[in-house]
Structure formats: C-alpha cells, structure tokens
Image (cartoon, grey):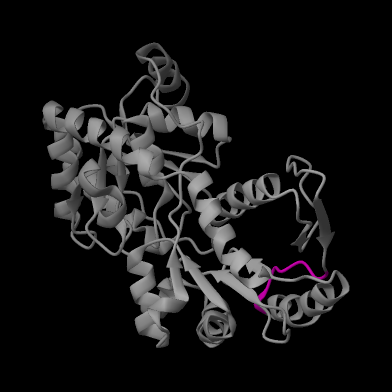
Amino acid sequence: MEGFGHYSYEITKRLCESHTEHEFVLFFDRAVDSSLRFPSNVKTVVLFPPTRHPFLWILWLELSLPLALKKHKIDVFWSPDGLCSLLTSVPQIITIHDINFEHYPKDVPWIARLYFQFFFPKFARKAKHILTVSNYSKSDISNTYSISEQKISVVYNAPNNLYEPISEEEKLAIKKEFTFNSNYFLFVGSIHPRKNIQRLIEGFALAKKDLGDLKLVIVGSAMWKDKFLTIPKEIEKDIIFLGHLSLENLTKVTASAFALTYVPYFEGFGIPLVEAMKCGVPILAAEATCLPEVAGNSAIYCDPFDISSIAKGMLELYRNKNLREELSQNGLKRSQEFNWNQTAEKVWTCLEDELN
C-alpha cells in the first residue's frame, strides 16, 4: 500500500474497532487481501468490475456501488480516495487528498486526467461533506471548485506506530544490508512525476562531489508505466532503488537514514515527513504547497524547481551536525501532533453527523 492505502486502512480499522455498536460494510473491487484483519462487525463485499481503467471506475461507481448501497441498506458512505457515486441518494462523505491534476495535468496519463478533471468537481459538489489532509488542500479545493470552506474539514495523516528511533547497532545492520555500509539520503513515495525525483537526482548529482560516500536511496513503486527518470552515469552507483519494502523494513530504512530528502512540487500532505519525524530523522523538504505546514521546524527547505537549491540543502545537512541534531529533536516533538486515533475520531464525527 502507498499513501492512500495506508490512510484508508489505518482509519477504517480504527472506526470498526472503536464503534462495535455499528455494522460496517467495506466495498472492494477485487478479492480481499488475506493480510487484512477486521473485527466481527465488518462485512466485506467485492463489487465488479476491478477498477483498472477510468471506464471501469465509472461502471463501479455508477452501477455496482449504488445497487450495493441499496442492497445493504447503507446509512452513510465514506470514500477515502475522493471518489463517490453521482447516482445514489445515500449521504456520502469523501476524502479528497489533493487536486494536483488541476494544476499539473501533464503529471497524469491523459485518460485518467480527463476523468479526474470531469468528475472531481461533480464529486465535490455531490458529497455531503469533504475531508482533506491539510489546510493547504482545504483552501485549494475551496478555491478551485468554488465550495464553501465550511463544507471541508481537515484531518491530518499520521505515522504508523512502528516508526521509532533505533539503535546505532541496528542502523549499521540496515546499512550493511541495503547500502553497502554507506550513509544515505532517503526518498520514500510513489515513483511519480510530481514527486520531483528527477530534480532530486540532479540535485544529488550536483552536490555529490562534496558528499563523500553518501548514497541516495529511493523507496517506492512506479505509479504509472511511463519511464521519466534519467540517471547521470557518474552517479549511477550512488543511487539505490529499493522498490516496495515491507513495513518492517521500511521503518528500519527510514530510521537509519542520514536525512529524508522530500521535495515534491505538489503534495496534499506527505506522510513520509511525519514518519521521518517520528524516527528523529532530519528533513530537507520542498518549500511548496502543504509541506511547511506539516514539517514545520523539523525541516530545512528548498525550491523544488531549482536543482542548485536542492543541492545546497543536501550540503547544509551534510556539513552541519548541530543543525541535524536540532531538526531531529524538533521532529520527535512535532510528530506527537499526528495520531491515527485522533484522525479516526475526527472522521467518525463527520460520519456520525450524517447518522443522527
């Protein structure tokens, strides 16, 4: 699971466990993964078709879902990824994480872009209430779709409880396993144009001669099939792609990082920021969209469109031990403000308003 998946699972699990007086029906578009565990007040239902194409999204949302909502006598429907049905009278609450596709449409394949730009304004108007993950996204949704901010509530994301600082001995073991015993800058996220990984790589290349044997580790899966990354030959050996990692390995790789380098030019929240903060890992973040809102004084900032600014930030972290220690302590303290239990209860409050 990437960001949306973690968000959906962490909140849904807590809602179901905390409110056993209610029955929850979870709608899936394919067989339910055996690793997912839910309490006895949960029914899982698989609806056809698997949503692997925008045309199939339409069939699922506008045919299968309305019939299922009626069949199972659903009182209120929550969609954690911004999608909802336009053909049902059941009250719907949706989480819109961000609307990057409105500002950077070329970052999304054309067929998905057409779908998003046509349907998301309709979804936003159809929903009884909208949840989003930052004040930046709240303002953006309100301004772009001409929707009152009173209809939108902010509920922050949070890190998994497994993220925590680890011992120097554990860090050495992780570096031995994944980076040939080298310290490393870390990026975590989907391999997607808006994550700005190409400029991150170019910034790293610009700074590399002054960074000793530091590596750049990139963790994440390709979101689209398009190939858009170019690696300069002189630093090929210094960039390590780990693909998708298990949660156990990801927490350890995060906690062992020299610093998190997270420089998307557009983001709704940025869960890797709070994961790094919870591990006491200093951060270089883009001074863009919601990222300063989330990272606060746990990061230094750079211009995501300027590779020299990215390189300068990397070098500042590399050279300034006192700064790294300050950011680490700030992050440990700030991470306490982000908690899945609190987030789930805020989501529940919105759902309960529709039940009463």
Where does residue 208 sit, x and y in percent of width and height?
20, 38
Looking at this view, name the residue that lies furthest to the right.
Answer: 71
Q: Is residue 321 above or below residue 122?
A: above
Left or right of 75: which side holds 168? left
The answer to whether residue 83 is seen in the rendering is no
The answer to which quarter of the image holds residue 287 is bottom left
Q: Residue at x 45, y 73 (%)?
A: 152
Q: Is residue 260 above or below residue 301?
A: above
The answer to whether residue 97 is seen in the rendering is yes
Q: Nearer the viewer, residue 38 or 6?
A: 38
Where does residue 229 sit, x and y in percent of width and height?
40, 56
Q: Which residues are magenta?
A: 48-54
Q: Nearer the viewer, residue 90 or 354?
A: 354
Looking at this view, name the residue that lies furthest to the top.
Answer: 169
Q: Does the magenta segment cover residue 49? A: yes
- Look at the magenta stretch and give its main secondary structure: loop
